[in-house]
C-alpha cells in the first residue's frame, strides 16, 4: 500500500511540473555540439569554459522586423539561442506590434506564458477548453497569463506601436499555429482575431472590456 501511495504521489508531481529539474548548478548549451543520443535538452558546455557571457543575451534589445502582413514580430530565445537557459526550464521572447499589428491564434504545448507590456496598448486573450474567451486590455506595466496549451492571441490596441516581453516555464515551449495546421491563410486568421478582440459574438470576462 505504501509503495502504491508513493507511485501515485510521483505521478501527480510529474504531471504538474514543467521541464525536468536540472542535475547541476549550470549547464549552458554547448555551441555546435551534436550528440549521438537523443536527449531531452542540449549537451552541456565544458564546465571549465563556462563564463558569465553564457548567461547574458542582447538579442532582445532591438525591435524585430515588423515589415510583414501581420505587422508584428516575435523573437523567441530558447536554450538553443540563449545557452544559459539550458536545463533551467525557462525561455523568453519579445513581441513587437505596429499600430495594426497582431499575433494570431497559437498555442505553446509545453509551457504557460506570462506577457508583460512595456510599451503601448495590447489586447490579449485566450480560449479555454469550454470555448470560453478571456480577453482584456493591457497597458504599460500590466501582466497577463496564457495557460499552458490554450489558444491565445495579442494585438496592438492603441495609436502607436506596442512592445511586450513574455516568459515561459519551459526552455522550449513549442509553437502551434492553427493557420498552418489547418491550411487557413493569414488573412482569415487575422480577421478572426480582430473579431474576437472587438467582442463580437464573444463573452468578455474581464472588467476592462474591449
Image (cartoon, rainbow, N blue to C red):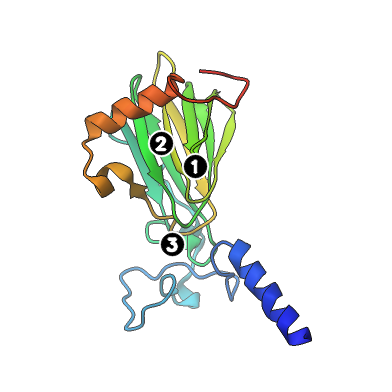
Residue at disc 2, secondary structure: strand
As drawn, the residue found furthest toward the top would be 159
Residue nearest the viewer, comparing 52 with 75? 75
Say few, some or many: other residues with alpha carbon within 10 Å of mark 2 (under 14 / 14 to 19 / 20 or more): many
Q: Nearer the viewer, residue 143 or 118?
A: 143
72 is higher (above) or lower (below) than 179: above
Q: Residues within 10 Å of mark 3 (few under 14, many from 20)?
A: many
| Label ID, residue 97 | none
Q: Residue at x 48, y 65 (%)?
A: 86
Q: Residue furthest right?
A: 2
Q: Position of residue 15 (x, y in %)?
A: 59, 65
- Is there a contact, CB below 8 Å, between mark 1 and mark 3? no
Q: Position of residue 127 (x, y in %)?
A: 48, 38
Q: Earlier in the sequence, mark 2 or mark 1?
A: 2
Q: Which residue is mark 2?
A: 95
Separation of residues labelled 1 and 3 (CA atoms): 18 Å
Judge whether 87 appears above or below 137 on screen: below
Q: Residues within 10 Å of mark 1 (few under 14, many from 20)?
A: many
Q: Whole-percent x and y of residue 157? A: 44, 19
Point out the image quarter for the N terminus.
bottom right
- Residue 201 relative to residue 209: left or right: left
Q: Is residue 35 toward the left or the right of residue 25 in the image?
A: left
Q: Secondary structure at mark 1?
A: strand
Q: Find the distance from the CA under tag 3 to the CA under tag 2.
A: 21 Å
The residue indicated by pointer 1 is 166
What residue do we see at 54% from left, 54% from top? 169
Do the residues under discs 2 and 1 have CB atoms within 8 angstroms? yes
Dot in front, 3 or 2: 2
| Eye-nearest disc, 1 or 3 | 1
Label ID, residue 83: 3
Q: CA distance from mark 2 to mark 1?
A: 8 Å
Amino acid at each position: 500500500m505504501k509503495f502504491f501511495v508513493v507511485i501515485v504521489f510521483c505521478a501527480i508531481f510529474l504531471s504538474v511540473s514543467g521541464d525536468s529539474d536540472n542535475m547541476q548548478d549550470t549547464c549552458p548549451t554547448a555551441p555546435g555540439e551534436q550528440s549521438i543520443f537523443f536527449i531531452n535538452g542540449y549537451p552541456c558546455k565544458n564546465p571549465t569554459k563556462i563564463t558569465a557571457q553564457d548567461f547574458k543575451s542582447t538579442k532582445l534589445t532591438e525591435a524585430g522586423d515588423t515589415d510583414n502582413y501581420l505587422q508584428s514580430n516575435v523573437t523567441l530565445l530558447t536554450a538553443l539561442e540563449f545557452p544559459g537557459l539550458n536545463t533551467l526550464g525557462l525561455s523568453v521572447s519579445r513581441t513587437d506590434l505596429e499600430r495594426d499589428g497582431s499575433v494570431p491564434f497559437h498555442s505553446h504545448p509545453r509551457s504557460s506564458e506570462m506577457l508583460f507590456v512595456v510599451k503601448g496598448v495590447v489586447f490579449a486573450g485566450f480560449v479555454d477548453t469550454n470555448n470560453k474567451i478571456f480577453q482584456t486590455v493591457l497597458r504599460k506595466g500590466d501582466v497577463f497569463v496564457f495557460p499552458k496549451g490554450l489558444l491565445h492571441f495579442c494585438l496592438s490596441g492603441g495609436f502607436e506601436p506596442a512592445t511586450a516581453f513574455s516568459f515561459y516555464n519551459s526552455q522550449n515551449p513549442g509553437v502551434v499555429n492553427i493557420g498552418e495546421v489547418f491550411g487557413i491563410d493569414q488573412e482569415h486568421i487575422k480577421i478572426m482575431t480582430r473579431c474576437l478582440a472587438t467582442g463580437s459574438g464573444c463573452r468578455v470576462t474581464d472588467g476592462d472590456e474591449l
